[in-house]
């Protein structure tokens, strides 16, 4: 019986501690450059990666590039584990909202002195360069950016009698309701499909009405989502959402299902998201998949879109920093960036910008507060909680925004 | 960490035979008495090395401020019990603890009741049906939790899930595009079905083995005395298998209290919020998501203490049963 007690206690200890275990990534030998890119590159532009690798190995005989693709949802946790084990990759792609915390902690190599070595670096997009800069020092290379646009079915819009691209939010809503009424017989059809908890969409409305997420005042962060302007934006979002969505999407965050999957199944006439959504809207709709800029409540202006983007950084522990910088230069060459632009991304430099729908949408954009702890707000799902509870009616818009505002201020003001 | 089959090892059902009383300490018995300890020593040393090192490390970590900055420099800052006091004064901790206790009790209760019922069924059915059922149970047991989560996720998907389709087709209601993950209760309903499904084989097979140890003559004698089936179950069968039930319950409590894989993956990493945390997920989000390893370690130690306290309760009652 004592043995069983031991078994029980051992099991207790093992299980309680099992949760705290972590794994480290594979090690890199001296002549292998380990690169962590997000799966977007694997799905969207593997040829750009391959071209950079061959350019790099041609100039660096004896080197091989080991590209490991990562998921947005857990790449930072894996990265932390490699830091603990002194076994970081040599190059890592970071979301522009993720940079600050790591720059502040001293995790990335200072690239200020080598800036001119990177192609088009004197024309880099201001927003992206700012996301890779901390205390006036450069810790990352802008990779690409993306705004958000409307991807829609032109056949449905035409059939509903819509002849012109909507110039205002109110007009767009009227058009969508028209399409929705026309397609009523399609079960589960939403004229526009976005997940209710897709905060990238919802906060566009907040910024459109002059609101914001948080402000830095007298040395402290103050939550701003419960300010009158932010509330006006959230109310506008709720009203727009309820007019154009089926109820069941209120608690979805736009990753399961992906909006373009719903599009490809014929269950929606439009998505609001990155311009590369055209990749996946379905072969049968390829000819009728078109895009326009999401209109603001002020006619003629675009709704401010989240300026998403990625930077490439070199972890301070990497023994191959010079080679890593050379690979980044190859990967962000003019040819690479033009290929990325062709896939529906915004290139990293102003001299490469065109007049695409994406570039026009980026004329008005918003970004998250550049606070060290911002990434904790994302990881804590504070914004999703707010949107889910206000759209499902659990809380009023004001209540939900007040709670979120307090939580954001508390998170941002925590000592790093 | 997970409560489904793969990690579970079959327990040898306790034989109802009487155990010898405690040895008296004489010189002869002292030398003889050392043998079991020597035999146990390798296991104890191995367990000590595997568990001892991380535990010492964890305790050390829980007394430090250890965030990203400390991770990069590989040096924590000693802050005493500040991590513990901040966790214990956090309303999220207490809400999560309460939610986890209710969740674990519901899961253990369902697992044990259904498990015993199926085991009793196994005794009564014909050999080939029993083989069929046992085969099915073993297949469930062999399914890795991550795969099971994926399949469960597909079946309950709001857009194309078979569950919504079937419920609508058979006329139970309109489940078209019903989101099974829209409320905490519904989320954990789904997680519970998955966990109980995965935990049943172990319980059923073990209880079935224990049931085969129930002396038939006792059952027959009781029946001759006019006992009905439930009286036989209550007075004869259950007391004999009680030690096995206790250890199964005890292990299930430990597993279900610390469950992570199914809850985290089925609900989804993007949907973990203070309003639906379980303890292990709270620990993961605080420690890893927020890169606050010291605080994560403190939560981990508190969790360990709770699970240890729960086990002590069961282990004590188990020992009492053994000594009767």
Image: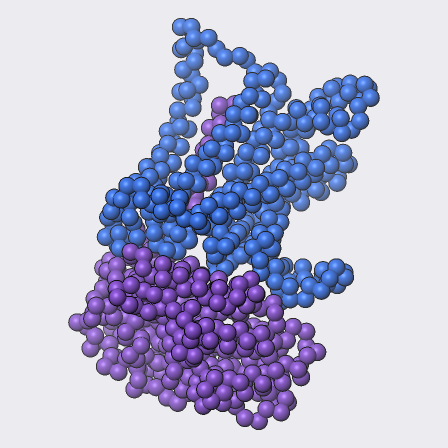
Chain colours: A purple, B blue
Rendered residue at 50%/34% (across/down): B310
User: Residue A221: where, in percent of width, then height?
Assistant: 32, 64
Residue depicted at x 82% and y 19%: B224
Residue drawn at point x = 23 percent, y = 60 percent: A106
In this picture, is A249 found above or below A122? above
Q: Nearer the viewer, residue B300 or A108?
A: B300
Percent position of residue B146, x then y: 53, 52
Q: Is residue B250 left or right of residue B298?
A: right
Residue extending furthest top?
A: B27
Residue drawn where x is 30% and y is 71% of the image: A131
Q: Quadrant of residue B218?
A: top right
Q: Is residue A38 visible?
A: yes
Q: Work out whether A207 lies above or below B267.
A: below
Residue A391: x percent and y percent? 55, 68
Q: Could you tell whether A237 is left or right of A410 in the image?
A: right
Quarter of the image with the C terminus of chain A is bottom left
Q: Is residue A78 above or below residue A146?
A: above
Q: Residue furthest front?
A: A228
Horizontal side, residue B138 vs residue B257: left or right: right
Is residue A46 something that shows in the picture?
no
Q: Nearer the viewer, residue B206 or A172?
A: A172
Give the residue at the far left of this rendering.
A113
Work out whether residue B19 or residue A375 is closer to the camera in this orientation and state it: A375
From this view, report whether residue A280 is shown above or below residue B88.
below
Q: Could you tell me residue A13's position as x and y percent?
A: 43, 36
């Amino acid at each position: 019986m004592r043995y069983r007690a031991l078994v029980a206690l051992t099991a207790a200890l093992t299980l309680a501690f099992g949760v705290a275990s972590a794994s480290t990534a594979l090690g890199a030998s001296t002549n292998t450059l380990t690169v962590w890119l997000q799966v977007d590159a694997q799905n969207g532009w593997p040829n750009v990666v391959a071209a950079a690798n061959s350019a790099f190995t041609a100039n660096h005989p004896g080197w091989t590039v080991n590209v490991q693709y990562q998921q947005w949802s857990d790449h930072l946790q894996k990265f932390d584990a490699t830091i603990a084990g002194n076994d970081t990759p040599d190059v890592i792609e970071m979301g522009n909202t993720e940079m600050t915390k790591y720059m502040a902690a001293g995790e990335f190599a200072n690239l200020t002195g080598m800036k001119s070595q990177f192609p088009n670096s004197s024309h880099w997009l201001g927003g992206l360069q700012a996301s890779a800069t901390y205390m006036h020092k450069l810790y990352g290379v802008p990779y690409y950016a993306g705004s958000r646009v409307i991807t829609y079915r032109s056949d449905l819009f035409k059939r509903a009698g819509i002849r012109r691209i909507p110039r205002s939010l109110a007009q767009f809503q009227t058009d969508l309701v028209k399409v929705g009424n026309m397609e009523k017989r399609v079960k589960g059809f939403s004229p526009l499909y976005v997940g209710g908890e897709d905060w990238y969409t919802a906060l566009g409305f907040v910024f459109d009405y002059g609101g914001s997420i948080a402000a830095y005042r007298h040395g402290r962060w103050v939550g701003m989502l419960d300010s009158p302007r932010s509330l006006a934006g959230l109310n506008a979002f709720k009203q727009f959402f309820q007019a154009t969505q089926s109820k069941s999407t209120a608690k979805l965050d736009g990753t399961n299902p992906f909006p373009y999957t719903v599009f490809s199944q014929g269950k929606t006439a439009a998505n609001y998201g990155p311009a590369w959504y055209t990749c996946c809207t379905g072969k049968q709709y390829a000819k009728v998949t078109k895009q326009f800029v999401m209109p603001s409540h002020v006619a003629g202006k675009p709704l401010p879109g989240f300026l998403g983007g990625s930077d490439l950084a070199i972890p301070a522990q990497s023994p191959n920093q010079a080679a890593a910088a050379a690979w980044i230069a190859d990967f962000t060459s003019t040819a690479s960036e033009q290929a990325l632009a062709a896939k529906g991304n915004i290139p990293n430099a102003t001299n490469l910008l065109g007049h695409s729908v994406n570039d026009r949408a980026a004329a008005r954009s918003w970004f998250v507060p550049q606070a060290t702890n911002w990434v904790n707000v994302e990881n804590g799902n504070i914004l999703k909680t707010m949107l889910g509870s206000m759209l499902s009616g659990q809380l009023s818009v004001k209540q939900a925004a007040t709670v979120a505002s307090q939580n954001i201020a508390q998170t941002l003001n925590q000592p790093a | 960490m997970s409560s489904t089959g793969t990690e579970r090892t079959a327990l040898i059902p306790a034989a109802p035979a009487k155990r010898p009383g405690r040895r008296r300490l004489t010189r002869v018995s002292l030398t003889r008495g050392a043998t079991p300890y020597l035999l146990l020593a390798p296991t104890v040393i191995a367990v000590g090395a595997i568990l001892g090192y991380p535990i010492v490390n964890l305790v050390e970590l829980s007394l430090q401020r250890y965030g990203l900055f400390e991770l990069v420099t590989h040096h924590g800052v000693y802050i005493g019990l500040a991590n513990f006091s901040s966790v214990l004064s956090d309303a999220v901790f207490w809400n999560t603890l309460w939610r986890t206790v209710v969740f674990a009790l519901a899961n253990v209760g369902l697992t044990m009741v259904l498990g015993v019922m199926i085991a009793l069924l196994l005794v009564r059915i014909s050999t080939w049906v029993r083989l069929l059922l046992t085969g099915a149970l073993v297949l469930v047991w062999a399914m890795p939790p991550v795969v099971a989560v994926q399949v469960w996720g597909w079946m309950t998907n709001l857009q194309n899930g078979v569950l919504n389709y079937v419920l609508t087709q058979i006329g139970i209601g309109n489940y078209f595009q019903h989101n099974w993950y829209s409320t905490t209760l519904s989320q954990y309903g789904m997680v519970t079905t998955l966990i109980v499904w995965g935990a049943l084989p172990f319980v059923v097979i073990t209880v079935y083995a224990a049931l085969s140890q129930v002396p038939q003559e006792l059952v027959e004698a009781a029946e001759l005395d006019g006992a009905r089936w439930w009286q036989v179950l209550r007075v004869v069968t259950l007391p004999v298998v009680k030690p096995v039930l206790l250890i199964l319950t005890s292990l299930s409590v430990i597993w279900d209290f610390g469950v992570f894989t199914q809850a985290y993956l089925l609900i989804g990493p993007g949907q973990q919020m203070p309003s639906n945390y379980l303890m292990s997920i709270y620990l993961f989000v605080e420690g890893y998501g927020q890169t606050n390893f010291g605080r994560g370690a403190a939560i981990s130690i508190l969790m360990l203490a709770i699970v240890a306290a729960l086990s002590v309760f069961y282990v004590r009652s188990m020992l009492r049963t053994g000594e009767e």
